[in-house]
Amino acid sequence: MSQTLEDLERALQVGLDEAQKAAIAEIIEYAIAEAFEQQGRSQPWKPLSPRTIKQRRKRGTWPGNILVEYGNLFQGIQVRVEGSGQETKIVVRGDVPYLRIHQFGGFAGRGRKVKIPARPFVDLLDEDIDEIIDVLLK
């Protein structure tokens, strides 16, 4: 990329118009869709535990995608670019309470005894960042 850091800083100080915000949200939404399709982008998601696979087989939802049993997680994700100037932020929200634990990992279940590995679906690659920078510099 031939743009300089100073060009990028100037673009960020000016602020983003609505078309730029929409374009950035679209890049991130595409990256999320790719993560679900590929079951990980920068690295493959950790497999489900044997217990989870057994439960999903019983329900008829395995074999299948690691984070897609009924589609609620993926379908509920919303990406927005809010604010202006240096107050601009990217917001990723979801309709399900387990969104964060799948992104970052942690403990869940009764007594928080079950360790859930991180399976990041908001996983931007260098090419995504380059696309976002191109949008910022337009």
Image (tube, helix red, strand yellow):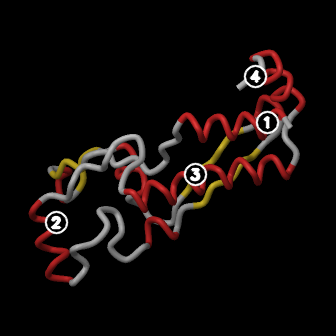
> Where's residue 106, x and y in %?
28, 44
Q: Which residue, given by chain and number where applicable, does mark 2 sit on?
A: 52
- The tag earlier along the polypeptide, 1 or 2, is 2
- Image: 125 above or below 58: above
Q: Which residue, given by chain and number where applicable, does mark 1 sit on?
A: 136
Q: Which residue, given by chain and number where applicable, does mark 3 sit on?
A: 92
Location of residue 4 by image quarter: top right
Mark in the foreground, 4 or 1: 4
The quadrant of the picture occupied by the C terminus is top right
Say which of 129 and 89 sits in front: 129
Mark in the foreground, 4 or 2: 4
Say which of 6 and 112 sits in front: 6
Say which of 34 and 70 sits in front: 34
Residue type of the residue flagged with mark 4: Ser
Location of residue 47 by image quarter: bottom left
**How much space separates mark 3 and mark 2, taking CA atoms?**
27 Å
- x 61%, y 50%: residue: 28
> Where's residue 18, x and y in %?
85, 51
Location of residue 104 by image quarter: top left
Residue type of the residue flagged with mark 3: Val
Say which of 21 and 30 sits in front: 30
Residue type of the residue flagged with mark 2: Thr
Mark in the foreground, 3 or 4: 4
Q: Residues within 10 Å of mark 2 (few under 14, many from 20)?
A: few
Q: Which residue, given by chain and number where applicable, does mark 4 sit on?
A: 2
**How much space separates mark 4 and mark 1, taking CA atoms?**
14 Å
- The tag earlier along the polypeptide, 3 or 2, is 2
Residue 34 as seen in the image, left or right of residue 15 = left
The quadrant of the picture occupied by the N terminus is top right
